[in-house]
Image: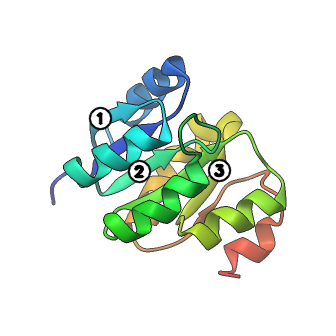
């Protein structure tokens, strides 16, 4: 099986660099962007297997982008990686079509595991996320 194609979206370039390094052995990082509008354009062109996106980005936030991505690249699976831990954000992310949700503070420990779960067709809810029990059970 070939390595999954991973695309990264975050408005902080240093976060993108750290994620690229963290995921280098797990898949091919095919691109990065720093805003939601660029995410939509690049995802349509590159058709990644996994998209890892922050919520807070200029142009189009990660939740709105996820909603659009579900329509224009339905085979791409979105994982939200954010600082927002409140249950309302988790709910909004899954309602928008995300397959995973985890906190940036736990990315080093959890992101590779989250990618593997989502690639296998499972949902992933990271440690420390609000309402974890509800979302882990598939809502």
Query: Which residue: 53% across, 38% down?
Result: 59
Q: Is residue 12 left or right of residue 46?
A: right
Residue 102, numbered label: 3
Q: Residue at x 59, y 36 (%)?
A: 57
Q: Residue furthest top?
A: 14
The disc, 3 or 2, on the residue closer to the chain's N-terminal end is 2
Q: Is residue 68 above or below residue 57?
A: below
Residue 137 picture quarter: bottom right
Mark found first going from the N terminus, 2 or 1: 1
Residue at the spot 65% in from the left edge and 37% down from the top edge: 104
Q: Quadrant of residue 17?
A: top left
Marks 2/1: CA distance?
10 Å
What residue sits right under mark 1 in the picture? 31
Which numbered dot is residue 51?
2
The residues tagged by marks 3 and 2 sit, at their Cα atoms, a distance apart of 13 Å
Query: Among all residues in the image, which is located at the extreme front?
Result: 59
| Dot placed on the residue nearer the N-terminal end, 1 or 3 | 1
State the SS at label 3: strand
Q: Nearer the viewer, residue 14 or 120?
A: 14
Q: Position of residue 126 (x, y in %)?
A: 67, 55
Where does the C terminus fall, quadrant-wise?
bottom right
């Amino acid at each position: 099986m070939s390595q999954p194609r991973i695309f990264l979206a975050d408005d902080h370039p240093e976060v993108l660099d750290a994620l690229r390094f963290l995921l280098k052995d797990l898949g091919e990082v095919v691109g990065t962007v720093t805003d939601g509008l660029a995410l939509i354009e690049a995802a349509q062109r590159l058709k990644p297997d996994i998209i890892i996106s922050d919520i807070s980005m200029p142009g189009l936030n990660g939740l709105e982008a996820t909603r659009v991505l579900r329509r224009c690249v339905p085979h791409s699976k979105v994982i939200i990686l954010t600082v927002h831990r409140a249950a309302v954000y988790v709910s909004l992310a899954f309602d928008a079509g995300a397959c995973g949700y985890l906190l940036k503070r736990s990315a080093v420990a959890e992101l590779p595991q989250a990618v593997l779960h989502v690639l296998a067709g499972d949902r992933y809810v990271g440690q420390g996320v609000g309402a974890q029990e509800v979302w882990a059970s598939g809502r």
